[in-house]
Image: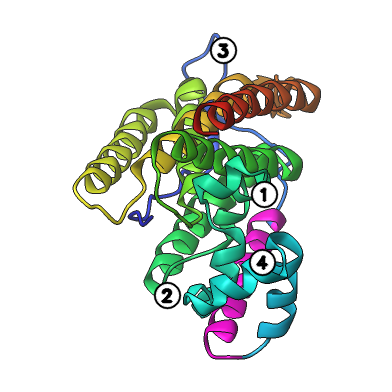
Amino acid sequence: MNESMPPTTQPPASEAVPGSQAQVLVQRQVQQPAVTHILLGVTVLVFLLQLATEAGFLREPFIELGRLIFGRADMDALLAQGWGSDLLILLGAKIRVLIVQGQWWRLFTPALLHASLLHIGFNMYALYAVGRSLEMQYGHGRFLLLYVLGAFGGNTLSFLLSPGFSVGASTAVFGLIAAEGAFIFQNRHMFGDRARPALQNVVVILVVNLVLGLSSSGIDNWGHLGGLLAGGAFAWFAGPVLAVEGLWPEYRLVDRRSDTQAWVVGVVIAAVTAGLVLWGIRLYS
């Protein structure tokens, strides 16, 4: 699941004060993108483990884990059939028949796995480009929730509508792109003339990537769409909505939405997504 790299939207540096046409500088506390960097590091580490197992290193711990999951006889049979070339993909990819059998972690772990160096390169560049600015606006916890919901929603829609196996962080990345668009639109009064071209960029990126997905059999477009829907829904109802408060000259930007509201929205979206998974398990059992 590959996609091209979206541009970042920098936080607005100056805003129009209500009731005035003047542009003034305002202050807002933003958090540094620690979660983005951790996600990058963990995903790259997992890819290095994939390469190591392909090269014959560190295989035994993952073979033993596979025997715990599948049973010794079934795991040995899978290895004999050639499924051991990338043990981590075997253990964590989105595979419908195994999710139906109860391996729910496969609705999350594909976001940590990648099929090639080019694949992880595209996705990690996109995460770095979009994630930093979003996390500085969202905060650590809300940003992590957005990322996880994008991966969960993307892999769930892929589970329901795509029988093949899939891996890649682009489910979560599409959720981030949707969240970027929602953030710009809901705070367009803060961005002024920059809002329209920034929104147009987001729309073009989404359309181009979805069209590319439809034109290639190797891209899980349902996963992309699911990440887009889950991330977009969370961003629309729980993303930052900024307002200017204070008296001149000490204006500041504040977020009208609380962390509590964000977590409630996140739980609702996760519950709806889990309900779809249960329906899919009944459908394909």
The first of marks 3 and 2 along the sequence is 3
The first of marks 2 and 4 along the sequence is 4
Q: Disc 1 on helix, strand or loop?
A: helix
Viewer-nearest of labels 3 and 2?
Answer: 2
Which dot marks residue 117? 2
User: Which residue appears at 68% of the width and 24% of the height?
Assistant: 271
**CB-based contact (under 8 Å), mark 3 and mark 4:** no
**Cα distance in 3D space between marks 2 and 4:** 15 Å
> Eyeballing the image, is 63 above or below 248?
below
Q: Which residues are magenta?
A: 34-56
The quadrant of the rendering that contains the C terminus is: top right
Q: Disc 2 on helix, strand or loop?
A: helix
**Cα distance in 3D space between marks 1 and 3:** 48 Å
Q: Disc 4 on helix, strand or loop?
A: helix
Residue 267 seen by the camera:
yes
* Pointer 4 residue: 42
**Residue at the extreme right:** 260
Disc 4 marks which amino acid? Val
User: Which residue appears at 66% of the width and 44% of the height?
Assistant: 104
The first of marks 1 and 3 along the sequence is 3
User: Which residue appears at 54% of the width and 63% of the height?
Assistant: 113
* Pointer 3 residue: 18
User: Which residue appears at 57% of the width and 12% of the height?
Assistant: 18
**CB-based contact (under 8 Å), mark 3 and mark 2:** no
**Cα distance in 3D space between marks 3 and 4:** 44 Å
